[in-house]
Amino acid sequence: MGEEIKRSLIRFTEDPHRPLWEGILLAVTMFTTSELSSLMQSHYFYLMYRVGTRVQTCLTAAVYRKVQQMWYKDERTKMVNEVLNGIKVIKLYAWEPPMEKVINGLREKELALIRRAALLRTLSDMFNSASPFLVALSTFATFIMLDPKNVLTPEIAFVSLTLFNQLRTPMSQVAEIITQTVQVVVSNRRLTEFLISDELSPFCVDNGARDREMDKLHGYIGLTGRVSYVPQQPWMQNQTIRQNITFGKKFDEYFYNRVLDACALYPDLQMLPLGDMTEIGEKGINLSGGQKARISLARAVYQNHDVYLLDDPMSAVDSHVGAQLFSAVIGPEGMLRNKTRILVTNELAFLKHSDHILIMKSKLLSIFWSEF
């Protein structure tokens, strides 16, 4: 409609015999149609932005909830976090250059993809900006060269430019739609993989019930006395070794020394300048895995409770040290010989000292009464 009104207005200006009211009517009609088109377009964008904002809000909330329970993390971010968590060890062994090289390598890969995407976006924007001029130039040149009698009059030029201008937005949006479609497909695939990835489910019986947090389906559960738990992954407080072992309990030097001897900690303490008064760094960073496992076991033994839940405490120590720990602490002649001990292990050599053997296979539990 706008092109026809503009065509009629140009014809009106070229014909001096046409009445004035016709020109005024054409001008008012052009103004009215332009205003209505602008209002309708603004309302259209308003509705689309509302829909887009709602969709973005829903996706943001879903992604945020997933981030709080996710396993997977970005490779570069994960590497940086590992370096920051182990910064003391890295400084101690002078590993800064290789760690920096690894992080920079991951960053360069990330920047290469960003540069490539920016280059493609720039070329697309340049083409979209120059396309109206190129289209008009090629069209007018073709129109004149096809027939010498063709004359580029103001009517033809202005109407054509108006049509080109109207086609400019859809044509420029074609490239943008292609780019956005590719991004939508990639984002949809990544969001789908992200939202269906594994989560931390500590309250699910199937894959992560914590100590004494499993739901009883049937039968009877009874507990007499206090319970100590030794996890497979030991945890340390940012305190001295002695404070980590006593764990707030009153210090008994005789019993404490017995625990140190049974848990094979004396040789390690003798190598430390301050012995058991040595400060343990954050997360036990200045201790080996075997030392942390023995300190965790010593902490449980020092509490002198009635029931002990031992989740493979010898997995982080050497075989001969594990045999010593079993003999001096867990076994029938150990410090816990008069306690109830539930031991999870894959060491078959310890089975002959057990009262009951429970074997897990394919999520099924078989109970064998020991004859040893």
Image (spheres, rainbow, N blue to C red):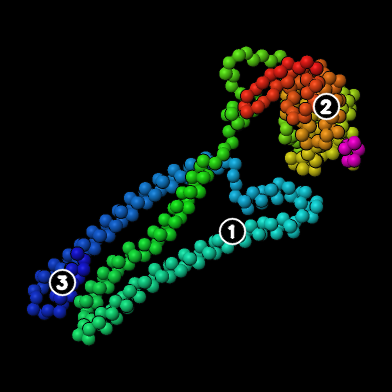
Q: Position of residue 280 (x, y in %)?
A: 80, 39
Marks 1 and 3: which is nearer the front? 1
Residue at 74% over, 59% down: 97
Give the magenta part as a residue range: 267-272
Residue at 32% over, 63% down: 170
Distance from disc 3 to disc 2, alpha carbons, whole Å, reads: 102 Å
Categorize mark 2 by other alpha carbons within 10 Å: few (<14), some (14-19), many (20+). Answer: many
Give residue 262's mark.
none
Above-or-below relation of 144 to 223:
below
| Total marks in image | 3
The three-letter code of the residue at mark 3 reads Ser
Does residue 216 appear left or right of residue 327 in this picture? left
Q: In what element is the residue under mark 2?
A: helix
The three-letter code of the residue at mark 2 reads Phe
Categorize mark 1 by other alpha carbons within 10 Å: few (<14), some (14-19), many (20+). Answer: few
Above-or-below relation of 45 to 152:
above
- Residue on which the image places disc 2: 326
Q: Earlier in the sequence, mark 2 or mark 1?
A: 1
Q: Quadrant of the N terminus?
A: bottom left
Q: Residue furthest bottom?
A: 148
- Residue on which the image places disc 1: 110
Does residue 355 appear left or right of residue 103 in this picture? right
- Residue on which the image places disc 3: 8
Marks 3 and 2: which is nearer the front? 2
Above-or-below relation of 332 to 118:
above
